[in-house]
Image (spheres, grey):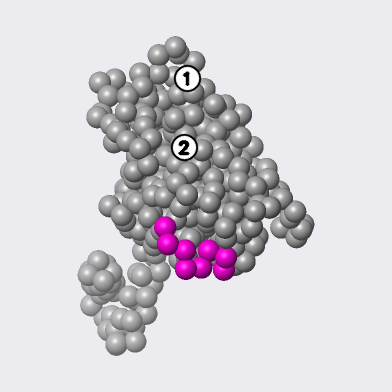
Amino acid sequence: RVWVLHVAENLYSEMKMSLGGSVKLNHTGVTILVLVCLLTGYLLFPSRPNQNTIGKNEAIISLKTLLQTSIRSAIAGGLKVVEVRSHSDLKEGSKGKTKEGANDPVTDGDMLSHFAMVGVISEVFPHISIVSEEKPKQPEEEVSYGHVNIDQETQQINGLQDELVSAKDVLIWIDPLDATQEYTENLTQYVTTMVCISHNGRPIIGVIHNPFTRLTAWGWVGKGFSSNLRYNLNKKSTAKKIIVSRSHKGKVEEIVKSSLGVDWQVVPAGGAGYKTLEVANGSVDAYVHTTLIKKWDICAGNAILESMGGEMTTIDGSAIDYSSAEDFKNEGGLLGTLKKNKWILGKFKGLKL
């Protein structure tokens, strides 16, 4: 306002001087002059974000650009995961024991993937907070991740309508290497890298990438999902299969059989990302987990299932909140499904974990 009034005042003074002091403007004339200056300033200095500033601006970000960046991030991390797995020494360590007494391993694959994934995102969106499973010390040498080609994914994403949101309402959750235990056993079919975008605590974008099969699945709630997730939601399921963790089972098999029936098959598998995709492609009816699970393990899958019309909730049907980096534990159990969610929730009603 001050700038506009200053310009108007100068313009009025110059007009008055050039016309020998004969110019007299009433209030209406001054108002018109100010409006002209406002319009000129708007055209010369637009406040609308453009493609060059999106991501570099603390206030406004493009979710379409963030989805594309998330895919690049997951693939870049995956390249490091594959690279380390090709070596004979994974430099395996341990974070300790899980609540169930299982070893919680960590490898160079986890660490290098973390740096690559964070690097890709931070380069485009330096102002968005990232929550990662890994918290390694900064490496002595910069971790390079090179060029990641996502032309195939971009072709589909370009057809989606963009959405601009405030960066302060966004929190990114990443899992640099899901299914580390299986990774150390060379059971690479279970291994994924994952990125999730939460907006005001809701998971709205999820990316799950298997670096060994090179499958990349993504979902954007309310917008669409990757073309490789083409499960027919209207097709009647006869599977009667529940997928569960192979290393953190707890009492899940007993709970499933007693709640749903003895004719339901329990399928053990590694990796939360893998198990979610088994639900997404219709191989199983639901993903059930009854012990503690971290939110970076489930956020991406949560977004993908929701983008396909499914749900991922706690066992009692409560939504899972992803708004706080400090609140990273989900202790209410987990149920992820595309169909039969309400029916299964009813069967689990009153269950004590």
* Boundaries of the magenta span: 346-353
Residue that sits furthest to the right in the current view:
235
| Magenta-drawn stretch, dominant element (helix, strand or loop) | loop
Local crowd size for mark 2, using a 10 Å CA cut-off: few (<14), some (14–19), many (≥20) = some
Residue 63: percent from left, percent from top = 48, 53
Query: Which residue has dot 2 on it?
Result: 247
Q: Residue at position x 32%, y 28% from top?
A: 94
Query: Which residue has dot 1 on it?
Result: 85
Local crowd size for mark 1, using a 10 Å CA cut-off: few (<14), some (14–19), many (≥20) = some
Secondary structure at numbered mark 2: loop
Residue sitting nearer the eye, 100 or 83: 100
Residue sitting nearer the eye, 110 or 225: 110
Query: Looking at the image, is mark 1 or mark 2 earlier in the sequence?
Result: 1
* 307 is higher (above) or lower (below) than 185: below
Image quarter of the C terminus: bottom left
Q: Residue at position x 47%, y 68% from top?
A: 350
Magenta highlight on residue 351: yes
Residue 123: percent from left, percent from top = 37, 37
Image quarter of the N terminus: bottom left
Res. 338 image quadrant? bottom right
Tag 1: residue type? Arg
Residue 344: percent from left, percent from top = 59, 63
Magenta highlight on residue 313: no
Give the CA separation, mark 1 to mark 2. 21 Å
Tag 2: residue type? Ser
Q: Is residue 43 visible?
A: no
Residue 306: percent from left, percent from top = 56, 58
